[in-house]
Image (cartoon, helix red, strand yellow):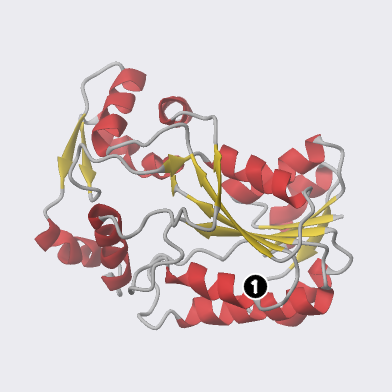
Amino acid sequence: MFVVTGSTGKVGGAVTGTLLDAGLPVRAVVRDADKGAAWKARGCAVAVVPDATDAQALAIAFAGAAGVFLMNPPNYDPAPDLTDSRRAAAAAARAVAEAGPGRVVLLSTVGAQATAFNLLNWAGFFETALADTGLPVALLRAAWFMENAAWDLPAAREGRIASYLQPLDRAIEMVSTHDVGRTAADLLREDWTGTRIVELSGPRKYSPNDEAAGFAAALGRPVEALAVEREGWEARFRAEGMRHPEARIAMLDGFNEGWIDFAHEGAEHRTGTVAFEAVLRHIVERG
């Protein structure tokens, strides 16, 4: 039995689907029973864990697993002390230690090793806590998700997308959630001891200008990328409803300045096959 958290999301859904397609038993962990109905209809067992900091409920969900795919519930506007992530990491580690699955694959992130304050610090909390369990753990550090571009579709239809990634011709590592899910499912079926770091990127690096060109091709009309001035980020984020934009701003600075990147040393590297252009076409087709 393989246990998958985040099954109702893009990555967790890809992991679950890949394992099911391979004829393997899966237990999907969801926050409420209704969200697990579709997976139950496909033959999954379903475990309901409403609170990601409930170590006892997680341990029950993980019991008897050959492998567990673990995700941190996303929080894009955390308090500066990142308390929610610290609590979730501690609970996940306690649950894993109690349940003793055969192996754990954590969806981590590019830049997890960065110690400077930023939105991705949660990954360091999870990586350290899980490594300390002594179980076989794979830290899957995925690049920037290509599917983040879905937020830009309405603007792309108007001919211009606003970019916080700068300069506009600077390419960074990106990867499709499909490749992330497939790679995680592959790792769950592998055997190893100790802790391993797996860095995952797409076929090549992409820039904001590449995104604009991809949208233009998919929409059949010109699209350009425009850089949002750094000085206006905080006011813009607060106007959008964020209470604590500091962590997000620091993360974007990290990508733009290059200190959020793959570590390379001491890590394996894998490359996905899905191109950004294909993801952008899919985003446009789905509307």
Side of 259 where 135 appears, left or right: right
Q: Quadrant of the C terminus?
A: top left
Residue type of the residue flagged with mark 1: Ala
From this viewpoint, is residue 97 visible?
yes
User: Residue drawn at (15%, 45%), measured in percent from left and top?
Assistant: 227
The residue closer to the viewer here, 184 or 238, is 184
Q: Residues within 10 Å of mark 1 (few under 14, many from 20)?
A: some
Up the image or down, 247 lies above or below 21; here it is below
Q: Quadrant of the N terminus?
A: bottom right
Up the image or down, 169 lies above or below 281; here it is below
Image coordinates for residue 56, horizontal then vertical, percent: 77, 81
Image coordinates for residue 207, horizontal then vertical, percent: 28, 37
Q: Which residue is mark 1?
A: 131
Quarter-of-image position of residue 102: bottom right
Farthest-out residue, front: 265
Quarter-of-image position of residue 182: top right
Side of 12 where 149 appears, left or right: left
Image coordinates for residue 259, horizontal then vertical, percent: 31, 60
Secondary structure under the numbered disc 1 in the rendered image: helix
From this viewpoint, is residue 52 visible?
no
The residue closer to the viewer here, 110 or 152, is 110
User: Residue drawn at (15%, 50%), measured in percent from left and top?
Assistant: 228
User: Residue drawn at (58%, 38%), measured in percent from left and top?
Assistant: 179
Image coordinates for residue 204, horizontal then vertical, percent: 41, 33
Up the image or down, 30 lies above or below 182; here it is below
User: Residue drawn at (50%, 71%), measured in percent from left and top?
Assistant: 124
Q: How many marks?
A: 1
